[in-house]
Image (cartoon, rainbow, N blue to C red):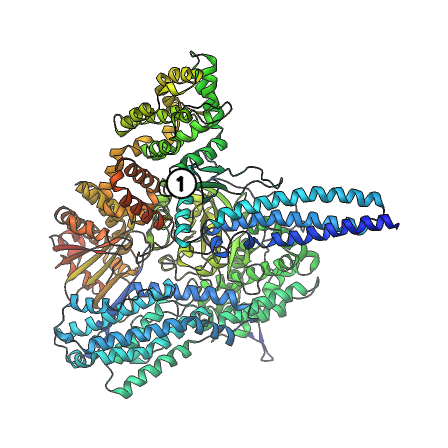
């Protein structure tokens, strides 16, 4: 923000004209009709790809041999299933903590009682995890690990798979993931020893006791889960791009870049911290260094501890109270000055971007500016009708009960609070430059306020041109209604929709899956669906499990994965297709569409309440969980090998098996190929996360496969996609023809779905892709004829394993 | 207040106090069904039932509060006398509510063990699916289903949406009784859901009219008799369309009796003469499946139930009706009905899908996973029922194996609900 030094030496800000209001001039709050319903029209919108971010392992230029070895080990250890298991624990813990927070009489800070509650909740799994590691370590000590094949190692570890532990499924999944991680670690060391790496060779004799030492990292890991669940990690906390390089250079953990604000910290951080510490433990020079690693593990977690989310919860609640108690004509500036810092504290950009400029100046300016805009709704004469107007937008239908006085009274204050929070968030999305000019800040704030008001105020109070939707009377309210802490927003109108199979197939949900596949694989629903569509919006601290926990609608009301996995992203395309109201959808960065474990503040979602349909219970004896068909890729450049993990959902796997039993190989290949085509395009086309692992030399900056390949040009990217589809498709066709029985046998195992593991050795064009990843320039000749670069056939092989695999 | 009035007041006050205490006893629904039995329900069925039953008790409680208020206000003998008569009426209301609670409590309580609860949950799912097949394309709501097990030969249904004994409320769920002896072959479940569907779409009346029209060339009393049987014929047709020959064999086993009973005609009974009822099922099989084991069933049925066992009037009715059975079967399955959106039932539920060779092809294509994979269990639950009951019908030497297999997949289908009912 610019300022002028006056003759007296004081700083004066420039004068400004009154801000434009988004509100209708009339104070009247007319009676409105009940919420209108409409049916979705069957048309297919333009599709969107959902790119993901790579998980990246490799050597940085100038990296030491030791660091390189550690990176290789991290590659072997990383497990997407472990991420899922940890995410599930965090989601359950977050829902549990939020449910009990007010019962335990806490206002903010995740006080001692909540912490004790979660520690007790985690204690059984900690004990089992440590016991499991001890048992595995003991077994390893009695083996000559170096002479064991991979299969023998897998069989050894399989003995210790958690069974009938009496623990909840999310804890058992965690134990399974931990065991698999231990296996990955041992395999990694053995492979490195076979490559003649001295530091790995040294480890072999003492691998058992070393694995035992990993027990020391369990408590810190679970402590991180606890901190996530208690909202004690700042949103935007994410895994460092080149963890090892930064560790060597002593860099701090990175925070999120500019743009949308994540609602929470990234769960991936937990596994990656653990992996790094485990690898460091392994390569520690002596016992003292090992102890130092374990000690540092706890310190690292404490360093990340931050109460900004809980402080925002409390600040918001206080602001609502203060504003609700103001009389007409009283100035809300002071209340805003108390509230704004808490909002800014959770926005990474704002935390750093304005630290030089002067937070105080920004707060003062914005507080005065926004006070003018909300002044007309201060005082009971305005607040009461505003609250009533919000109720009339459909609150009764939403809760199925008349809201109580206690729930109604703060609605006006909550609408103002929501508007203020969303305004500041939107301002922050513009980047730090916005704070350098008062005029620019004012303009941005004005626009942001209009957009925020359009979300938080009833439409009948708004100028028509800024309303989010036409002929729809809903608005967004903080939820849960009857709690001090708010965890999400809900739209007060619920829509009746009818979704044909064609429409469902055209809508994408998290992970690039179609809504049709999600409905079939999660709920067993096919054909035309009639549903009530509930809309939600993320706020700071939203986990989808909190939405599913607090929403008492059929099919939700639980923090189980089967509940929150039915919540889908409401993009403009989905909103346009399902509701004919694209304005109700929110465009979001692809990283927040990758999976359900990280969403952005302001991101929107929907849940389809389908009469009579509930998530099916886990089948007794069945392992894993239902997932939709997908592809995951490992590009292993040192080995000159690509591995495609073509996961077929239970439905697809059984249909392929049935076709093979009928000797209808064509039908089998058709189903598999559809998965390959959709999956490769989703995974490879753009920024990638979770669905692709790469082992390569990396440039000094973290790069994304899609972004890097974009440098090489869309033509090269399309050529790679086409070739991967061709090669993987061919491998699967040959496989179904030659080894149908093996596939059929795998589908009879009691695990959800099967994974066809396709290995492409010496793939043509690998050198081009490798150079692109390193950021090297690509010759015009190669760009002119990319198909020539990719011409030829890799050596193809395929096999099928029961259940989901990606390693 | 005179002595007489005081004495009257004492009697009335005692009765009010008694009924207030009695209503309190109804408040705890676990007095009617155990906690574990409630937990055996799918969560939202449990919530819906509790909410409904609690609502009935709450209304009763409010009525009782009114009595107490009236007692406080009553000062004259006339007022007390009026109150005494209102207490008698309240007593009737109490018994009605208690009957409703008892009925549902008994139904819920039949989920006595986890395994039985799983089997009955599985029955809930099968029943619901069978209704969805027809009601969802017609954009009609599918009522929740509560299946319970009880003694006896035949299944029964308390339809959803019926006014209950408490006089005020409608039944929140279709309560379907399956018999213990048929729990491992519950095709009768689908017969009962056929009643529910027929009630919702008005099929009984339409079918009666269609049968009358199809039999217009016959003596009026014959056509009227068949029209009068339309509700049970509709339900039998529904079971056949979903489960094929298995339902016909199961029906045969339920209605088998001495010939005079099989050939008995009861005026006003909506059930067809058993003799004709089974042969109609055989005709449906012939019409849609061609030749098969139902031919033998029909021949054996006719042989063991000679029409000479019937009274002359019934014999005439039966002998006149038998040649009409193919036409009647066609009307039931192939005549367009307004209630089905101007389509025949077969257009919504195609019996060809449960033809024996189609069922065996399903078993062959799906392999052993047919009975274990959540995909097949969800997608083909009704055809699994048809397959299991077909095998039970035509492979009695494998009866034990078939029963075990059936129980196993039913148990998987009805696996414990994710969230326990409150």
Q: Nearer the viewer, residue A416 or A122?
A: A122
Q: Nearer the viewer, residue B394 or A594?
A: B394
Q: Nearer the viewer, residue A87 or B2?
A: B2
The number of numbered badges drawn on the structure is 1
Q: Nearer the viewer, residue A222 or A108?
A: A222
Can residue A10 be seen here? The reply is: yes
Can residue A282 be seen here? The reply is: no
Query: What residue appears at the point 42 percent right and 79 percent down from the top-left corner?
Result: A302
Residue A298 figure quarter: bottom left
Decide: few, some or many residues near mark 1? Use Cα within 10 Å; few <14, some 14-19, many ≥20: many
Q: Is residue A357 above or below residue B171?
A: below
Is label 1 in a helix, a strand or a loop? Answer: helix
Q: Where is residue A111 drawn, in percent x and y?
A: 52, 75
Q: Where is residue A20 drawn, in percent x and y?
A: 59, 56
Q: Chain ID for label 1?
A: B
Query: Where the C terminus of chain A falls, by quadrant?
Result: bottom left
Q: Where is residue B305 drawn, in percent x and y?
A: 35, 24
Residue bearing mark 1: B129
Query: What residue appears at the point 48 percent right and 18 percent down from the top-left corner?
Result: B224
Q: Is A774 on the left or on the right of B305, as rendered?
A: left
Q: Where is residue B184 drawn, in percent x and y?
A: 35, 43
Residue A418 figure quarter: bottom right
Query: What residue appears at the point 28 percent right and 86 percent down from the top-left corner?
Result: A289
Q: Is A526 on the left or on the right of A447, as rendered?
A: left
């Amino acid at each position: 923000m610019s300022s002028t030094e006056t003759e007296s030496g004081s700083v004066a800000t420039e004068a400004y004209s009154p801000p434009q209001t988004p509100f209708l001039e009339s104070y009247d709050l007319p009676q409105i009709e009940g919420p209108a319903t409409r049916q979705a029209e069957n048309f297919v919108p333009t599709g969107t790809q959902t790119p993901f971010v790579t998980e990246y392992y490799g050597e940085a230029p100038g990296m030491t041999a030791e660091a390189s070895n550690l990176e290789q080990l991290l590659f072997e250890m990383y497990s997407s299933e472990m991420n899922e298991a940890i995410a599930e624990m965090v989601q359950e813990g977050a829902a549990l903590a939020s449910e009990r927070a007010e019962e335990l009489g806490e206002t903010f800070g995740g006080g001692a009682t909540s912490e004790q509650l979660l520690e007790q909740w985690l204690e059984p799994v900690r004990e089992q995890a440590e016991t499991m590691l001890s048992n595995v370590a003991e077994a390893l000590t009695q083996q000559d690990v170096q002479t064991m094949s991979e299969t023998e190692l897998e069989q050894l570890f399989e003995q210790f798979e958690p069974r009938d532990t009496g623990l909840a499924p999310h804890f058992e999944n965690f134990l399974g993931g931990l065991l698999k991680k231990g296996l990955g670690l041992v395999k990694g060391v053995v492979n490195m020893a076979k490559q003649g790496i001295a530091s790995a060779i040294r480890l072999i004799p003492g691998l058992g006791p070393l694995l035992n030492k990993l027990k020391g990292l369990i408590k810190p890991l679970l402590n991180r889960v606890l901190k996530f669940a208690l909202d004690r990690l700042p949103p935007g906390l994410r895994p460092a791009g080149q963890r090892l390089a930064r560790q060597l250079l002593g860099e701090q953990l990175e925070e999120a870049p500019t743009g949308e604000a994540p609602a929470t910290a990234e769960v991936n951080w937990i596994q990656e911290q653990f992996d790094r510490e485990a690898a460091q433990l392994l390569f520690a020079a002596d016992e003292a260094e090992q102890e130092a690693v374990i000690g540092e593990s706890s310190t690292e977690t404490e360093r990340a501890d931050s109460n900004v989310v809980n402080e925002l919860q409390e600040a918001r609640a206080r602001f609502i109270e203060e504003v609700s108690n103001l009389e007409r004509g009283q100035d809300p500036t002071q209340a805003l000055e108390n509230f704004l810092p808490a909002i800014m504290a959770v926005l990474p950009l704002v935390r750093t971007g304005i630290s030089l400029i002067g937070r105080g100046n920004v707060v003062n300016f914005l507080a005065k500016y926004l006070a003018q805009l909300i002044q007309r709704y201060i005082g009971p004469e305005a607040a009461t009708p505003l609250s009533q107007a919000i109720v009339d937008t459909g609150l009764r239908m939403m809760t199925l009960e008349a809201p109580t006085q206690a729930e109604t009274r703060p609605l006006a204050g909550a609408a103002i609070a929501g508007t203020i929070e969303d305004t500041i968030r939107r301002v922050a999305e513009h980047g730090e430059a916005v704070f350098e000019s008062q005029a620019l800040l004012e303009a941005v704030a004005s626009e942001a306020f209009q957009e925020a008001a359009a979300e938080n105020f009833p439409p009948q109070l708004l100028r028509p041109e800024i309303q989010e939707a036409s002929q729809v009377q809903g608005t967004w309210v903080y939820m849960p209604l009857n709690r001090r802490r708010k965890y999400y927003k809900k739209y007060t109108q619920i829509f009746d929709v009818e979704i044909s199979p064609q429409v469902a197939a055209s809508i994408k949900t998290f992970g690039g899956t179609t809504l049709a596949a999600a409905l079939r694989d999660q709920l067993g629903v096919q054909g035309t669906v009639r549903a009530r569509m509930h809309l939600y919006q993320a706020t700071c601290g939203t986990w989808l499990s909190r939405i599913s926990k607090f929403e008492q609608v059929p099919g939700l009301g639980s923090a189980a994965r089967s509940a929150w996995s039915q919540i889908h992203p409401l993009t403009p395309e989905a909103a346009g297709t399902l509701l004919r109201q694209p304005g109700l959808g929110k465009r979001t960065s692809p990283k927040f569409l990758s999976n359900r474990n990280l969403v952005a503040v302001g991101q929107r979602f929907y849940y389809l309440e389908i009469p009579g349909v509930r998530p099916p219970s886990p089948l007794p004896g069945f392992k894993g969980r239902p997932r939709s068909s997908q592809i995951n890729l490992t590009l292993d450049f040192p080995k000159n090998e690509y591995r495609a993990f073509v996961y077929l959902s239970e439905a697809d796997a059984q249909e392929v098996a049935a076709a093979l039993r009928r000797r209808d190989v064509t039908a089998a290949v058709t189903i598999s190929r559809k998965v390959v085509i959709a999956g490769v395009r989703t995974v490879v086309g753009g920024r990638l996360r979770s669905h692709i692992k790469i082992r390569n030399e990396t440039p000094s900056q973290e790069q994304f496969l899609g972004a890097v390949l974009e440098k090489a040009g869309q033509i090269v990217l399309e050529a790679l996609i086409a070739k991967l589809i061709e090669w993987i498709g061919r491998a699967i066709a040959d496989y179904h023809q030659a080894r149908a029985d093996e596939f059929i046998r795998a589908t009879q195992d009691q695990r959800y779905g099967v994974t066809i593991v396709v290995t492409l050795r010496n793939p043509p064009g690998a050198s081009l892709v490798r150079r692109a990843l390193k950021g090297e320039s690509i010759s015009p000749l190669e760009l002119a004829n990319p198909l020539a670069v990719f011409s030829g056939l890799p050596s193809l092989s395929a096999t099928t394993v029961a259940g989901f695999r990606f390693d | 207040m005179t002595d007489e009035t005081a004495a009257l007041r004492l009697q009335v006050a005692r009765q009010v106090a008694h009924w207030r205490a009695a209503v309190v006893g109804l408040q705890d629904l676990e007095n009617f069904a155990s906690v574990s039995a409630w937990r055996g329900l799918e969560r939202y069925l449990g919530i819906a039932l509790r909410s409904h039953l609690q609502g009935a008790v709450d209304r009763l409680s409010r009525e009782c509060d009114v009595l107490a208020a009236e007692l406080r206000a009553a000062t004259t003998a006339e007022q007390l006398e009026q109150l005494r008569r209102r207490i008698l009426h309240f007593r009737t209301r109490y018994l009605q509510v208690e009957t409703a609670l008892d009925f549902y409590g008994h139904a819920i309580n039949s989920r006595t063990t986890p395994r039985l609860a799983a089997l009955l949950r599985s029955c809930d799912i099968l029943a619901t699916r069978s209704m969805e097949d027809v009601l969802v394309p017609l954009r009609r709501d599918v009522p929740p289903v509560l299946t319970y097990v009880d003694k006896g030969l035949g299944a029964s249904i308390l339809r959803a949406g019926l006014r209950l004994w408490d006089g005020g409320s409608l039944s929140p769920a279709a309560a379907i009784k399956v018999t213990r002896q048929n729990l491992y072959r519950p095709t009768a479940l689908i017969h009962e859901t056929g009643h529910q569907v027929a009630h919702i779409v008005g099929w009984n009346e339409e079918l009666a009219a269609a049968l009358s029209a199809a039999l217009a060339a016959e003596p009026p009393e014959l056509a009227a008799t068949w029209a009068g049987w339309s509700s049970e014929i509709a339900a039998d047709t529904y079971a056949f369309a979903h489960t094929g020959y298995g339902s016909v064999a199961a029906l045969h086993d339920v209605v088998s009796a001495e010939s005079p009973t099989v050939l008995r005609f009861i005026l006003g009974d909506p059930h067809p003469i058993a003799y004709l009822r089974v042969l109609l099922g055989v005709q449906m099989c012939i019409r849609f499946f061609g030749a098969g084991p139902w031919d033998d069933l029909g021949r054996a049925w006719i042989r063991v139930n000679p029409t000479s066992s019937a009274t002359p009037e019934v014999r005439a009715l039966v002998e006149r009706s038998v040649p009409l059975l193919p036409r009647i079967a066609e009307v039931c399955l192939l005549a367009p009905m307004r209630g089905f959106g101007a389509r025949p039932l077969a257009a919504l539920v195609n019996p060809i899908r449960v033809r024996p060779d189609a069922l065996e092809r399903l078993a062959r294509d799906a392999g052993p996973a047919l009975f274990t994979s959540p995909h097949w269990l969800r997608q083909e639950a009704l055809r699994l029922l048809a397959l299991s009951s077909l095998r039970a019908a035509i492979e009695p030497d494998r009866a034990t194996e078939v029963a075990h297999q059936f129980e196993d997949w039913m148990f998987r289908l009805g696996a414990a609900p994710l969230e326990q009912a409150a």
